[in-house]
Image (cartoon, rainbow, N blue to C red):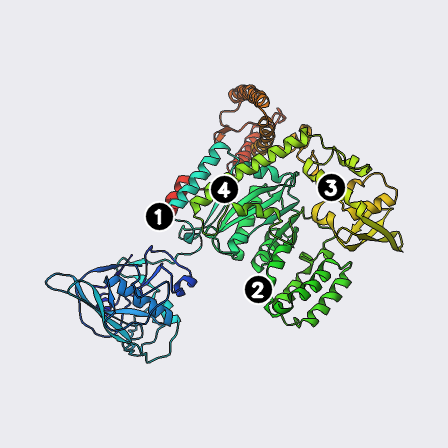
Amino acid sequence: MEINLEMPSHEQKKQNTGSNKNIDVMDNAYGLHVTEEEMYSPTCEYVEEACGPNENDGCTGGGDHVEGNTLKADAVSKGVTIEPQNGLEFETKEAAYSFYREYARSIGFGITIKASRRSKKSGKFIDVKIACSRFGSKRESSATVNPRSCIKTDCKAGMHMKRTQDEKWIIYSFIKEHNHEICPDDFYNSIQGRNKQSGVVACQKKGLQLALDEDDIQVMLEHFMCMQTENPNFFYSLDLDLDKRLRNVFWIDAKGRHDYNFFCDVVFLDTFYVRNNYKVPYAPIIGVNHHFQYMLLGCALIGEQTTSTFIWLMQTWRKAVGGQAPKVIITEQDKCLNEAVSDVFPDTRHCFCLWHILSKMPENLPCVANEGEIFMAKFNKCIYRSWTDEQFEKRWWKMVDKFELKDDEWVNSLFEDRKRWVPTYMQDTFLAGMSTTERYGSIASLFDKYIHKEGTFKEFMEQYKIFLQDLSEMEVTAGFETQNKQTALRSQSSFEKQVLGVYTDAVFEKFQVEVLGAVSCQLQKESEDGPTCNFRVDDFEERQNFLIAWNEAALDIHCLCRSFEYRGFLCKHAILVLQMSGLSNIPSHYILKRWTKDAKIAQSASVISKNLPYRVQRFNDLCKQAIKLCEAGSLCEEAYHIAFQALEEVLKSCVGVNNSVRSASAPNTLAVHGFLDIEEENRSNNMAKSSKKKKIYKKRKVLSEPEGPAVGLQDCYQQLVCHI
């Protein structure tokens, strides 16, 4: 888009009289929306003021266009704007205009082209006058649809620039003083409106339009196309606004959909890269497999952090994974996320990440910066050492009073949300190790080395593919070691022997550390409360003591360190209490299946077949089994040949069965998405034909609903490109 310096503002007014388009023009090098922050940024390179209409007469001029968003003049150095001065020289009129634009932006007033003139001999510009947007007098007609928000005061401030004989431009005159109060909104208002030359509404560049250009979208859609070609169970969805512009994107591969069936107990929606303004606003949905490894259960690109955005994301993700809600979802503490989770997952336990809470301390509590160590000691005691709800609340308010935080809004919000992040209130909530006190130690941080804050989308996609490959190799290696590695016992503990062949290798090693660590603890019985015995364990390795409540009749044990709640296996303190109580085996409910070698074993075929009335469900189940076969078959060359040969034989058998059924099927049976819709074998032969046709019609209606978005990839791409 270009800025017209040919036509002075009063001529533009005459051209549009009675057209109901009496509004300012916004210009932008890309013709797209920009955010409000960019509009006020003195170093922004996306916005240009336009030649808005005015009510005052001026000199007429010739014709030329200035390319929007041109390079700043030498007078602008490293983003610092210098005040205009008479005689200041520029290489081009574009540079001079950009210079005055940046000056106006930094001061906070709008500008407009008052007049321009060109040489009759050469046809080139020789003279341009730029004025404050409040110059002239208010004289609006009754036909004006959009009256100006900028009141005219006949302000004389402005800059007059002329071309020299050597075709450079100088500031001929400059008037600094304004006859009105400076209002930063004037600058914003002066760049709003319609492009009167084209009649097209100039759009602000916002959301994903800031992160993705035309080439980026092509790369993304080509990736989606490739993934669906490789595996039809790949799912993606595009969120478009009313103008068909891209707002948000979600996708999940076949493996993620498969894994979610087994590890839907805890998920983490990580908005770290969005909140920290990474160039690619990536938001992964994270889970943990039975090898204690990070896995992707969905990926999103977030345009705007709004409630509606997160509702769309969660609804789309829930649809992609079959409608099953997670038991626990972990997010940052954020109002929009809170509302979205409550709306989409009302029965899911919503928790906050401890790392996020702690990372917000310096920003939200600068008042305690001088007492940082003292405050954190009190805070940690309150959070991690409180045994009961009452004890926590007593310590909390004591801490609040001591540091005078009673009126702090963020502190009060933490207390209101205490049941979502304080360990005391989460004794029955399993978090799979995904809520840690440091991001560096969290599973989510594994993606940090693949994504960089200023990385382009193409770089992101390249790293994303590498990351998926690395994840797959890590899981295959862990699975191979679990099946083939002979892990040695390191103690005489019956607990260690009990889980040796049960836990995966990675989890067993973590549990083994706890068993060995029990020797550094000393047990002392504190009290009895009915069937519950309270113990104190002095941990000499960690140099602190822990309280343990043990109900032998109910086989129920709780430790202050809350290892089982946060990681899913018993700690050394609980192990010591069980040993001293004479138990030789860990109670079965403290050995979670999700950490065992059998975590991904599905239901028996007889149970599954009863739940597969439709082709889509049969398809999904076969994909799950195929992925398991691929995992096992890729471990070595011999297994690969066995799996490949078996697949070829099974495929031939299935094609033969389908052909025989197809020839015997009713002629009105329709193919859906390239697959024949076959009636169930157990359908009664005595059913009336009319009833049979009705049921077939219903089935077709269900099957015709696509797993992916309704719009084809090529159509989507064409629509998106047209609106970039």
Residue at which label 3 appears:
511
Q: Earlier in the sequence, mark 1 or mark 4?
A: 4
Q: Which mark is residue 464?
A: 4
Residue at which label 2 appears:
363
Q: Residue at x 17, y 69 (%)?
A: 60
| Residue in front for this viewpoint, 656 or 508 | 508
Indicate whether 708 appears above or below 664.
Answer: below
Residue at disc 2, secondary structure: helix
Percent x, y for residue 125?
18, 63
Residue at disc 1, secondary structure: helix
Q: Is residue 177 left or right of residue 390?
A: left
Q: Earlier in the sequence, mark 3 or mark 1?
A: 3
The residues tagged by marks 3 and 1 sit, at their Cα atoms, a distance apart of: 57 Å
Amino acid under label 1?
A: Cys
Amino acid under label 3?
A: Phe
Amino acid under label 2?
A: Glu
Q: Residue furthest bottom?
A: 179
Percent x, y for residue 154?
28, 79
Residue at which label 1 appears:
722
Residue at disc 4, secondary structure: helix
Label 4 packing within 10 angstroms: few (<14), some (14-19), many (20+): some
The residues tagged by marks 1 and 4 sit, at their Cα atoms, a distance apart of: 27 Å
**Which tag is nearer the camera, tag 3 or tag 1?**
3
